[in-house]
Image (cartoon, rainbow, N blue to C red):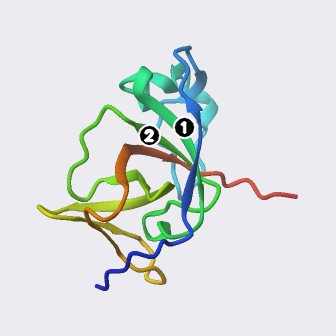
Protein backbone atom coordinates (compact mmCIF):
# COMPACT_ATOMS: atom_id res chain seq x y z
CA UNK A 1 0.00 0.00 0.00
CA UNK A 2 1.36 3.41 -0.89
CA UNK A 3 1.12 6.50 1.26
CA UNK A 4 0.59 9.92 -0.17
CA UNK A 5 -0.38 13.27 1.29
CA UNK A 6 -2.35 14.23 -1.84
CA UNK A 7 -6.10 14.09 -1.55
CA UNK A 8 -8.50 11.91 -3.47
CA UNK A 9 -11.50 13.77 -4.86
CA UNK A 10 -14.03 12.41 -2.38
CA UNK A 11 -15.48 15.09 -0.20
CA UNK A 12 -18.50 15.37 2.04
CA UNK A 13 -20.99 18.21 1.97
CA UNK A 14 -22.49 18.53 5.43
CA UNK A 15 -26.24 19.04 5.03
CA UNK A 16 -27.05 19.83 8.65
CA UNK A 17 -27.96 18.49 12.03
CA UNK A 18 -30.57 15.75 12.23
CA UNK A 19 -33.79 17.11 13.72
CA UNK A 20 -35.38 15.56 16.79
CA UNK A 21 -38.77 14.88 15.23
CA UNK A 22 -40.33 11.58 14.35
CA UNK A 23 -39.85 10.34 10.80
CA UNK A 24 -42.56 7.68 10.46
CA UNK A 25 -42.69 5.46 7.38
CA UNK A 26 -44.78 2.37 6.60
CA UNK A 27 -42.86 -0.80 7.42
CA UNK A 28 -43.07 -4.27 5.87
CA UNK A 29 -42.22 -6.59 8.75
CA UNK A 30 -41.84 -9.67 6.55
CA UNK A 31 -38.39 -10.27 5.05
CA UNK A 32 -38.26 -8.90 1.49
CA UNK A 33 -37.32 -11.64 -0.95
CA UNK A 34 -34.73 -10.87 -3.57
CA UNK A 35 -35.90 -13.97 -5.45
CA UNK A 36 -39.55 -14.83 -5.98
CA UNK A 37 -42.27 -12.23 -5.28
CA UNK A 38 -43.99 -12.12 -1.90
CA UNK A 39 -47.48 -10.78 -1.05
CA UNK A 40 -45.99 -7.79 0.82
CA UNK A 41 -49.25 -5.95 1.50
CA UNK A 42 -50.33 -8.80 3.81
CA UNK A 43 -47.36 -7.93 6.03
CA UNK A 44 -47.69 -4.12 6.20
CA UNK A 45 -47.26 -2.80 9.74
CA UNK A 46 -48.31 0.58 11.18
CA UNK A 47 -44.88 2.10 10.71
CA UNK A 48 -41.46 2.63 12.17
CA UNK A 49 -39.55 5.75 13.11
CA UNK A 50 -36.35 5.91 11.04
CA UNK A 51 -34.77 8.23 13.60
CA UNK A 52 -35.09 5.50 16.25
CA UNK A 53 -33.38 3.00 13.96
CA UNK A 54 -30.68 5.21 12.44
CA UNK A 55 -29.81 7.74 15.15
CA UNK A 56 -28.58 7.19 18.70
CA UNK A 57 -27.49 10.72 19.66
CA UNK A 58 -29.66 13.34 17.94
CA UNK A 59 -27.71 16.40 19.10
CA UNK A 60 -24.42 15.04 17.69
CA UNK A 61 -25.75 13.52 14.47
CA UNK A 62 -25.43 15.13 11.05
CA UNK A 63 -26.37 14.27 7.49
CA UNK A 64 -23.76 14.63 4.75
CA UNK A 65 -23.73 14.01 1.03
CA UNK A 66 -20.82 12.22 -0.63
CA UNK A 67 -19.10 13.74 -3.64
CA UNK A 68 -16.69 11.32 -5.33
CA UNK A 69 -16.05 7.61 -5.62
CA UNK A 70 -13.06 6.73 -3.43
CA UNK A 71 -15.26 4.61 -1.11
CA UNK A 72 -17.12 2.61 -3.77
CA UNK A 73 -15.71 -0.83 -2.78
CA UNK A 74 -17.79 -0.65 0.40
CA UNK A 75 -20.87 0.64 -1.41
CA UNK A 76 -20.58 4.37 -0.69
CA UNK A 77 -20.91 6.26 -3.98
CA UNK A 78 -21.12 9.79 -5.34
CA UNK A 79 -24.44 11.35 -4.30
CA UNK A 80 -25.10 8.96 -1.40
CA UNK A 81 -26.06 10.40 1.95
CA UNK A 82 -24.19 9.45 5.11
CA UNK A 83 -25.26 9.76 8.73
CA UNK A 84 -22.39 10.98 10.89
CA UNK A 85 -22.24 10.74 14.69
CA UNK A 86 -19.80 13.24 16.19
CA UNK A 87 -20.17 11.79 19.71
CA UNK A 88 -18.47 8.48 18.86
CA UNK A 89 -14.79 7.89 19.47
CA UNK A 90 -13.30 6.55 16.23
CA UNK A 91 -11.76 3.10 16.31
CA UNK A 92 -9.41 1.43 13.84
CA UNK A 93 -11.18 0.60 10.57
CA UNK A 94 -14.12 2.92 11.23
CA UNK A 95 -15.37 4.98 8.31
CA UNK A 96 -14.83 8.58 9.34
CA UNK A 97 -15.36 12.10 8.10
CA UNK A 98 -12.15 14.05 8.63
CA UNK A 99 -11.01 17.58 8.05
CA UNK A 100 -7.49 17.55 6.64
CA UNK A 101 -5.82 20.82 5.74
CA UNK A 102 -9.21 22.54 5.58
CA UNK A 103 -11.05 19.94 3.43
CA UNK A 104 -13.66 17.36 4.44
CA UNK A 105 -12.90 13.81 3.31
CA UNK A 106 -14.40 10.38 3.93
CA UNK A 107 -12.08 7.42 4.51
CA UNK A 108 -11.44 4.27 6.55
CA UNK A 109 -9.09 5.21 9.41
CA UNK A 110 -6.10 3.35 10.78
CA UNK A 111 -4.81 4.91 14.00
CA UNK A 112 -1.10 4.61 14.78
CA UNK A 113 0.95 6.12 17.61
CA UNK A 114 2.68 8.91 15.63
CA UNK A 115 0.34 9.23 12.62
CA UNK A 116 -2.84 7.89 11.11
CA UNK A 117 -3.66 6.48 7.70
CA UNK A 118 -6.77 7.35 5.74
CA UNK A 119 -7.56 4.46 3.42
CA UNK A 120 -9.78 4.86 0.36
CA UNK A 121 -11.96 1.94 -0.73
CA UNK A 122 -11.07 2.26 -4.39
CA UNK A 123 -7.79 1.00 -5.84
CA UNK A 124 -7.52 4.07 -8.08
CA UNK A 125 -6.72 6.23 -5.02
CA UNK A 126 -3.79 6.24 -2.63
CA UNK A 127 -3.77 6.04 1.15
CA UNK A 128 -3.23 9.38 2.86
CA UNK A 129 -0.66 9.46 5.66
CA UNK A 130 -1.58 12.13 8.21
CA UNK A 131 1.27 13.41 10.36
CA UNK A 132 1.78 16.24 12.84
CA UNK A 133 2.54 18.46 9.83
CA UNK A 134 -1.09 18.28 8.70
CA UNK A 135 -3.95 20.32 10.10
CA UNK A 136 -6.22 17.40 10.95
CA UNK A 137 -9.30 16.48 12.94
CA UNK A 138 -11.70 13.58 12.94
CA UNK A 139 -15.08 15.25 12.49
CA UNK A 140 -17.27 12.21 13.12
CA UNK A 141 -17.88 8.50 12.59
CA UNK A 142 -20.15 7.34 9.76
CA UNK A 143 -22.88 5.11 11.17
CA UNK A 144 -25.09 4.65 8.08
CA UNK A 145 -25.14 5.28 4.34
CA UNK A 146 -28.32 5.96 2.37
CA UNK A 147 -28.30 5.08 -1.33
CA UNK A 148 -30.50 6.41 -4.10
CA UNK A 149 -31.40 3.79 -6.70
CA UNK A 150 -33.90 5.90 -8.64
CA UNK A 151 -32.75 6.65 -12.16
CA UNK A 152 -32.70 10.29 -13.09
CA UNK A 153 -34.82 11.06 -16.13
**Which quadrant of the view contains residue 40?**
top right
**Residue 153: mark in rendering:** none
Residue 123 position in % (x across, y down): 43, 82
Q: Nearer the viewer, residue 120 or 34?
A: 120
Quarter of the image containing the N terminus?
Answer: bottom left
**Which quadrant of the view contains residue 122?**
bottom left
- Residue for badge 1: 63
**Dot 1, crowdedness within 10 Å: few (<14), some or many (≥20)?**
many
Q: Is residue 89 left or right of residue 40?
A: left
Q: Residue at x 45, y 76 (%)?
A: 6
Kindly state the secondary structure of the residue where label 2 is placed: strand
Q: Nearer the viewer, residue 41 or 19?
A: 19
- Residue for badge 2: 84
Residue 105 position in % (x across, y down): 48, 58
Q: Is residue 18 left or right of residue 61?
A: right
Q: Residue at x 37, y 35 (%)?
A: 86
Q: Nearer the viewer, residue 93 or 52?
A: 93
Instruction: Farthest residue to the front: give it.
Output: 133
Residue 91 position in % (x across, y down): 21, 50
Q: Residue at x 58, y 20 (%)?
A: 23
- Relative vertical location of residue 20 with respect to residue 64 in this rendering, above or below: above
Residue 48 position in % (x across, y down): 51, 22
**Dot 2, crowdedness within 10 Å: few (<14), some or many (≥20)?**
many
Kindly state the secondary structure of the residue where label 1 is placed: strand
The residues tagged by marks 2 and 1 sit, at their Cα atoms, a distance apart of 6 Å
Amino acid sequence: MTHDNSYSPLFVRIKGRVEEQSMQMPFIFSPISAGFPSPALDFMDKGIDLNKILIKNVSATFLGQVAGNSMMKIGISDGDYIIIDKSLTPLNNDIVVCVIDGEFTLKRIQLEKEYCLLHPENDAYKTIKVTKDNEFSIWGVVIHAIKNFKCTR
